[in-house]
Image (cartoon, helix red, strand yellow):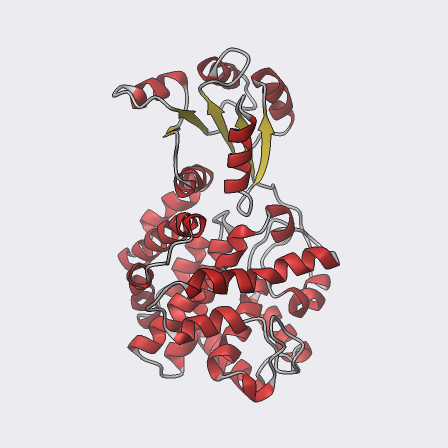
């Protein structure tokens, strides 16, 4: 999110509260509950329960989007807790993930029989948990991807899998494979170069993982912008991969800060701003990462007048790539759907950027970006 840059625009724009995604975890182990909360910290609000009876009574009042039930869940075990959940009309349709240490051959069949939709075998990777939860929360959204053109469908499948899997890399402090990132972005460039990206963006719009959606939109708009001004091949790949990776540090920021409506408190703003340095720390270990990708990640919140962060760069210190990334990031932040606001129409966002952000953004590049989007809208 371009925090200060979009404040004026968002303040003038209608805010609507939508249903917040909540993952409920029912597990008798305090350490297991803590692990779930930590793993999902930036993606979902987590409601953790030690006792199945208490969980059922609470969740009836405010049904979550997914429930994790451990096999040892008190007071009578996970299978019985699931049985109780399924008997409650308000919870009967909520997807359930069963967690267990048992990897018996009949597990999949047994899980379906008890009423769960999926299972995870402990110990599981963070990415496995994120992927399992995300696919159930987004089941209807991702099912619609099957209706898209092959390149668009492949692009969304590859990029969401890559994005979810990177969480393991961050946890283990291992280098990201830039080759994997490039392969995930190849379908994106094909979509951009054939001007069929609109349906793909429509397909990703309602996905619940905001960081992924925002990064995917930034990657797409940067690629569209670059393609329109004549960039080719490797340069376009830098834009696509840079856009997809530019906010990885947000995976380490709590959901309550990342998705807070309204103005952030000073300490919250400091945490939010830390995502840039966190991202650079993650990317720093990738030996074959192009310099341009680091520029996009490190400078997309810098401003021409020097009031941006993290380094307060200004004027000629910002090359064209940084200026393009700043424009696209602000545009995407304004037009993204959030849990606390609907998406702003592109024309309104561009108007706000043109009228009120002249000291922050490159005016010439902004005018070109506006022309690119308006031309695409009328095509």
68, 227: nearer the viewer: 68
Q: Tell me if residue 240 can be seen.
A: yes
Tag count: 0
- Quadrant containing the C terminus is bottom left
Q: Tell me if residue 264 can be seen.
A: no
In the displayed orientation, state which residue is furthest to the left. Answer: 105
Q: Is residue 58 above or below residue 287?
A: above
| Residue at x 40%, y 75% (from the top left corner) | 291
58, 340: nearer the viewer: 58
- As drawn, is 20 to the left or to the right of 234? right
| Residue at x 44%, y 48% (from the top left corner) | 171
- Quadrant containing the N terminus is bottom right
146, 321: nearer the viewer: 321
Q: Position of residue 220 (x, y in %)?
A: 42, 66
Q: Position of residue 191 (x, y in %)?
A: 32, 65
In the displayed orientation, state which residue is furthest to the top. Answer: 76
Q: Is residue 167 above or below residue 132?
A: below
Q: Position of residue 120 (x, y in %)?
A: 38, 30
Q: Position of residue 236 (x, y in %)?
A: 35, 74
| Residue at x 56%, y 18% (from the top left corner) | 52
């Amino acid at each position: 999110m371009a925090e200060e840059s979009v404040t004026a625009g968002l303040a003038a724009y209608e805010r609507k509260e939508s249903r917040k995604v909540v993952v409920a975890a029912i597990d008798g182990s305090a350490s297991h509950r803590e692990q779930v909360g930590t793993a999902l910290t930036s993606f979902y609000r987590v409601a953790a329960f030690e006792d199945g009876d208490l969980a059922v009574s609470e969740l009836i009042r405010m049904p979550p989007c997914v429930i994790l039930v451990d096999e040892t869940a008190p007071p009578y075990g996970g299978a019985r807790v699931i049985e109780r959940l399924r008997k409650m009309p308000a919870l009967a349709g909520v997807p359930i993930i069963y967690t267990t240490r048992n990897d018996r051959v009949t597990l999949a069949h047994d899980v379906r029989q008890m009423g769960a939709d999926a299972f995870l075998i402990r110990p599981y990777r963070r990415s496995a948990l994120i992927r399992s939860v995300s696919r159930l929360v987004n089941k209807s959204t991702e099912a619609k991807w099957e209706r898209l053109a092959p390149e668009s469908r492949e692009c969304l499948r590859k990029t969401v899998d890559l994005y979810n899997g990177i969480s393991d890399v961050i946890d283990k402090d291992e280098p990201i494979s830039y080759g994997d990132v490039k392969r995930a972005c190849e379908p994106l460039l094909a979509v951009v170069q054939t001007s069929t990206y609109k349906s793909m963006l429509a397909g990703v719009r309602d996905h619940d993982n905001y960081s992924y959606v925002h990064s995917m939109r930034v990657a797409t708009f940067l690629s569209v912008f670059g393609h329109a001004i004549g960039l080719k091949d490797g340069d376009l790949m830098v834009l696509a991969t840079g856009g997809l990776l530019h906010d990885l540090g947000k995976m380490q920021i709590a959901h309550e800060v990342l998705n807070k409506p309204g103005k952030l408190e000073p300490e919250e703003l400091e945490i939010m701003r830390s995502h840039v340095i966190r991202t650079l720390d993650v990317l720093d270990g990738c030996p074959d990462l192009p310099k341009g990708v680091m520029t996009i990640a490190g400078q997309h919140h810098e401003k021409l007048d020097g009031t941006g962060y993290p380094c307060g760069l200004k004027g000629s210190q910002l090359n064209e790539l940084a200026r393009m990334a700043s424009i696209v990031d602000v545009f995407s932040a304004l037009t993204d759907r959030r849990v606390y606001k609907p998406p702003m129409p592109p024309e309104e966002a561009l108007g706000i950027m043109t009228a009120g952000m002249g000291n922050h953004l490159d005016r010439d590049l902004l005018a070109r970006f506006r022309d690119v989007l308006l031309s695409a809208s009328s095509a």
